[in-house]
Amino acid sequence: MKKSTLTLAVALGVLAQQAGAAGFIEDSKLSLSSRTMYFDNDNREVKRNAQGRNGDQRETGQGFKLDYLSGFTQGTVGFGVDVQALWGIHLDGGRGHHPDNNNFFPSDSDGSAVSQWARLGGNAKARFSKTEGHFGSALAPNLPILVSNDGRLLPQTFEGGTIQSKEIDNLTLNAGQLTHAMGRASSNRTGLSVAGGTEDSNKFQFAGGDWKVTKDLTLQYYYSNLEDFYKQHFLGLVHVWPIANDQSFKTDLRYFDSSSDGKNGQAGYIFNNNGGYAKNAGEVDNKTWSAIFTYTLGGHALTLGHQQVGDDGGFVWLNQGNVADGRGRNEGAGGSSFYLFTDSMINQFARAGENTTFGQYSYDFARLGVAGLKASITYLRGDDIRNKTTSGTYNEWERDARVDYVIQEGALKGLGASLRHGMFRGSGESSADMDQTRLIFNYTYNFM
């Protein structure tokens, strides 16, 4: 039995003795979420990979997520537990269109998609005053220095412990230490790493907070350290100017400063700088800033912004995609998110020297009497990307469009559909032109 599962079982046994306490049962929530997803990735340059499989990817799957969130027991310190069960099912054969990259589905021994996979996790939790701690294997942080990915059938989760405190008015403090990751296409856990790293680390520590200076202004600072890979500082500012009724202007400024730590740069602990240039090969060395401005008027929202990635190396974030199991196979832990606007549908625009200008227009059709219907179109262009092995620079661009609709009433209330299409084109050493389409249906049923 895995350590995390044993810990959860012990916690459940202790809490069962107090299950009758007011709050533990009364405040419990049980829900079942369903996600059906069609994923089509047209790799326009590579039609066959090294194993002779079609380079394009077309697969359909069904995901289920069962969540039980207890309340807290009575007393000065309240205790509770969260349990999560995940199950993914392959709905088509996919043997000719599964690229054996564990990106959407785990791969079987012959490289084809497995028929299904599942995992069980959970957290023990405690609350004192306005401070909560969570320990377990179903953590899903959403912080500037770590964003849990939920872009496929099942969500990425982490193992470790986190604490959040709101004891001081208008100040939210977060801290924690994570030891393992559970990939969105995996039943197993892996250590923590970065893109290109084949060794892992079991210590990702972070601390920071959000200070709401006024109702319109929020300042942020976070520090994180992935042992033997990188250290990272983040500064953020978010300001919303309410111009008039139904009209506002939002400013969102973000700055990251990342540097090497411990064994970073040595064999197994390298960072691939997102396939691009590095001043010191394999080492983390980056400063990235972005400025985002959004003008909202009624149902219209227009976003414009710019991002600059430093010349010395690409932007870095947690990514376990190169960590393999004992057989040398990818664990399906690939696929991760980060806290920048350029983390788009296909590309990240995070290579050394990259200057990205971006814009997005979105509209909420509730203003026309169609509640639940939203649409957006986004365009990003990155220039001045430094080549890895030659002099000069190159560029890349991406255009994404999406339409989302959630039924607002009736027997199917809450059923959501999302149609997304992205087109990416690039030049230079790391280009891989792609067209991607996703069709997603989501529904959550609350039992209690």
Image (spheres, grey):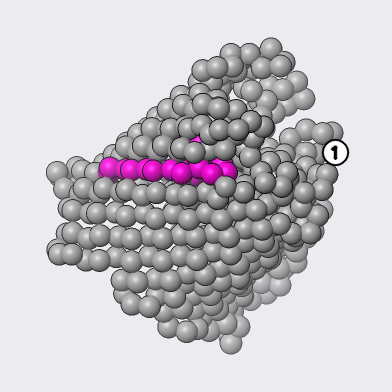
Q: Is residue 114 left or right of residue 167?
A: right
- Image point 60% across, 53% down: which residue? 286
- Image point 69% across, 12% down: which residue? 52
Q: Position of residue 398 (x, y in %)?
A: 42, 33
In the picture shown, does residue 138 fall above or below 173?
A: above
Residue 337 seen in the current view:
no
Is residue 351 inside the magenta stretch?
Answer: yes
| Magenta stretch in the rendered image | 343-362
Which residue is at the front of the view, 242 or 309?
Answer: 309
Residue 130 seen in the current view:
yes
- Image point 63% across, 30% down: which residue? 390
Q: Is residue 262 left or right of residue 365?
A: right
Q: Is residue 433 left or right of residue 52?
A: left
Task: Provide the secondary structure element on which disc 1 rests.
Answer: loop
Q: Position of residue 99 (x, y in %)?
A: 64, 23
In the picture shown, does residue 392 fall above or below 204?
A: above
| Residue that carries the numbered disc 1 in the rendered image | 326
Q: Main secondary structure of the magenta part?
A: loop
Q: Position of residue 146 (x, y in %)?
A: 57, 57
Q: Residue furthest right?
A: 326
Which residue is at the front of the view, 159 or 264?
Answer: 264
Is residue 174 inside the magenta stretch?
Answer: no
Using a 10 Å C-alpha cutoff, classify the residue at mark 1 as few (fewer than 14 neighbours), some (14 to 19) or many (20 or more). few
Q: Residue furthest bottom?
A: 76
Q: Position of residue 191 (x, y in %)?
A: 75, 51
| Amino acid type of the residue that numbered disc 1 sits on in the rendered structure | Gly
In the picture shown, does residue 359 fall above or below 296?
A: above
- Image point 56% across, 71% down: which residue? 208
Q: Is residue 415 left or right of residue 278?
A: left
Q: How many numbered marks are there? A: 1
